[in-house]
Image (tube, grey):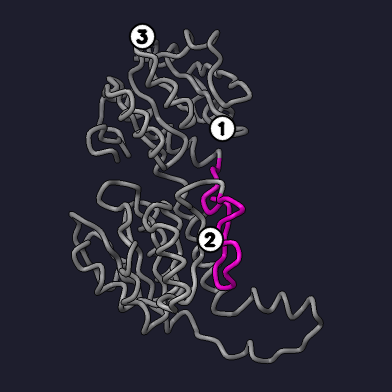
Amino acid sequence: MAAVRRSSLVVATSIRDLAASVRSLLPDVDVNVIQLDKTGLVPASSLCQVSGVVLCDPKVVVQLIGQIDLPLKWVQSTWAGVESIMSAVQESKKQPTFTFTRTGEGYGQVIGEYVIGHVIAHERKFKQMFKTNESRIWDANYKYIRSLSTLTIGVLGLGQIGTEITRMCKAMGMTVWGLATGQRKSDHPYVDEFRCTNDLCDLLSKCDYICNILPSTPLTRNLLSGDVLAICAKRKSVLINVGRGDIIDEDSLINAVNQGWIGGAILDVFAKEPLPESSRLWTLPNVTVSPHVSGPSQPSQVAEGFVNNYRLFCEGSPLKFQVDWKKGY
């Protein structure tokens, strides 16, 4: 087993220090590091070195899908999202023969911090406060706030990241609702109220914040589009999207804001990225845009998650966060 491990581990990523982190955790394993070109791909001259087990960026995974002659056993992406990879599989019309996993660990903490930070910033009106500071205006209206202990948040998607968000929100005293399919409330100790997708409207009507962390699948695309968010009008719920941008189309989101159905939106993901300068989302005063940075890759955590899976692979045990090529997630 050791000989196989020593000769078949390849790291091809643009994430700084990731390969070094993997090497530090696997000091007895030969790690073949392949430098990517300016486009983020493996140079043609280096493709022959890619075999066995590979840790790489999504763009490289897409590249490998088209290389049918490479002796690949297992490929793990350095990202949690798999949309571009699934699109490539659909276009190729051929299901890859290698096992594919995504990075499912290491993002929960930082994305949870993003969510909690924006909830606090919104309730404390930090955005407005910064403006009055610049104008040297003493505005005491900021003392009228809502404590997080009086607020309810609905988390759409209860995977590893969603579960960590529920834990952090519960630790801050919030009431937590969770939405997932094929799971039970008993599986989620930090969730006060559990709902399935069929009960989405019940959750939306009861929450002050709606946090989407769902993946992009045929069942989730446009889940919040149309007039779905009209049910949030009474509570003026704030939408936080750290999942995938296609949960709602841009026109529906803008309409929900302008109609007053929701009290605002905090957006880190979009159907089209980078968000075009012409997008009206940039100019809406109660919408905050961030450039898909809620969960930056932490080299040490991505490496740790991969190494945990690598050890399972060497034992012949089932891998964590394996993606089903047919289901697309």
Asked whether 295 falls inside the magenta stretch, the response is yes
Q: Amino acid at mark 3?
A: Asp
Side of 246 where 23 appears, left or right = right
Mark 3 or mark 2: name the one nearer the start of the chain.
3
Residue 114's disc is: 2
Residue 207: image quadrant is bottom left
Which residue lies under the disc numbered 3? 69
| Quadrant location of the N terminus in the rendered image | top left
Contact flag, marks 3 and 1 (Cβ < 8 Å): no
Residue 63: image quadrant is top left
Cα distance between the residues tagged 2 and 1: 23 Å
Cα distance between the residues tagged 3 and 1: 27 Å
Side of 110 where 130 appears, left or right = right
Residue 109: x percent and y percent?
Answer: 48, 55
Q: Amino acid at mark 1?
A: Leu
Which SS type dominates the magenta stretch? loop
Q: Amino acid at mark 2?
A: Tyr
**SS assignment at label 3:** loop
